[in-house]
Amino acid sequence: MAAQQPYHHGSLREALLVAGRELLAERGPDAFSLSELARRVGVSTAAPYRHFADRDAIIDALADEGYVIFHAALREAVAAAADPGDAVARIGVAYLRFAVEHPAVFQIMFRDREGRPAEYGPPSFQTFFEAVVLAQQEGYLADRYPAHSVARSIWATLHGAAVLDSAGGFSKLGIGAPLEQLAVELLDSYWVRPRPGG
Amino acid sequence: MAAQQPYHHGSLREALLVAGRELLAERGPDAFSLSELARRVGVSTAAPYRHFADRDAIIDALADEGYVIFHAALREAVAAAADPGDAVARIGVAYLRFAVEHPAVFQIMFRDREGRPAEYGPPSFQTFFEAVVLAQQEGYLADRYPAHSVARSIWATLHGAAVLDSAGGFSKLGIGAPLEQLAVELLDSYWVRPRPGG
DNA sequence: ACCTGAACACCGTTCAAGT
DNA sequence: ACCTGAACACCGTTCAAGT
């Protein structure tokens, strides 16, 4: 029911991102086609180049959208937490949930890329890091190593689980436990005193 | 100095795998081109299809080679270990080292794929699992959760660290510590009694 | 049985030309 | 300023034809 498109699309950049989000979710990062995207938006294959440098630039823009959603999810987890230990635990669940619910976006967020190395999705890691610092201070997490080291270990555990799980690695072992239970088992070894409700 | 190739290559399958290993290491999985591979081996672009169903089949074959090397590395780690706790610790170092030394192969080994879900690189996970069982029995690892759960958590920690590190995530934090030190910090929380030499 | 040559559909990217 | 049309180099894959 869209009206006949005028020669100038008007909000092509927006339209490319909206349709791009869908295309990425449908096809995954590897099969994400710029030509297909242009076709869906009803524009020539050259048109997107007026708004993005190349294919990678669009994917990066979609990754940026992912960082925003991801970061919001982590902040919600912290906001809902009863105390610093609970905050770390809830971030764990949120991390896994994000990876399962947005597998393609999750993949591009942490992919390696020339001039844009896979990062921790800052400022998300910063949010997590602060939660770890507080949890250490409250005695929930060991302080044998500095906070950045502990944060890195827990982050790696969550990231590894997210990658393997979203890729089907865990289901291979016949484990279909809910994310909450998985998160509890994954982080179990890090607690040095019981969490509230743990 | 290669002699003029006869019409029948003779060992094309082998040659494709050898050159494929190189091409994969040079370009990474995404830019791995079947045409380029055929060109390097000095054969028409259609020739590889006599030996592999498609591009994915060659990459899968290269992943299989990766599994073999990976598995050998884990077994060497176990063989060199002083006891079950040390075996788990050494597997950790071997895991990280493999990811750093063979980043492209590591990526395709654990990639998601239709009909070939990313797995733990069995039988490598089995080797690791057995080491965890023994380490639990010897009291090095907690037995609050069953061995498969503990093994999964440690595996996730190593996998996450390997992915983030080989993608440049860790260097972002300015941490250039050697792999051995990184492995020690990553696995620190899992030990419930000191390892030999820990 | 194994490989070539040529073709097809698709892709990312560029650029002169249109509005 | 923004978009089209047509082109280029490249890709994966297929298939009749060659040895």
Image (cartoon, coloured by chain):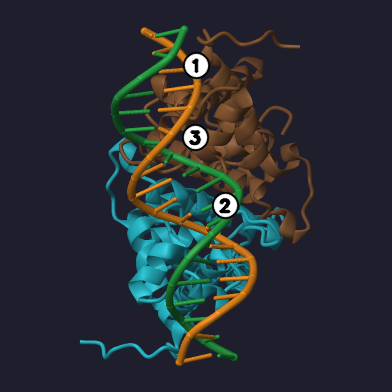
Chain colours: A brown, B cyan, C green, D orange
Q: Considering the numbered disc 2 on the image, is that residue within a helix, a strand or a loop? A: helix
Q: CA distance from mark 3 to mark 2?
A: 19 Å
Residue type for callout 3: Met
Residue in the image at 26% along x and 91% along y: B3
**Residue A130: in sight, yes or no?**
no
The percent coordinates of residue A162 (x first, y second) are 61, 43
Q: Considering the numbered disc 1 on the image, is that residue within a helix, a strand or a loop? A: helix
In which quarter of the view is residue B126 placed?
bottom right
Q: CA distance from mark 1 to mark 3?
A: 20 Å
Q: Is residue A1 above or below residue B14?
A: above
User: Which chain is indicated by disc 3?
Assistant: A
- Which residue is at the front of the view, C15 or A81? C15
Check disc 2 and report the residue beneath it: B156
Q: Are marks 3 and 2 on the same chain?
A: no
Checking the image for residue A109, the label placed there is: 3
Check disc 1 and report the residue beneath it: A13
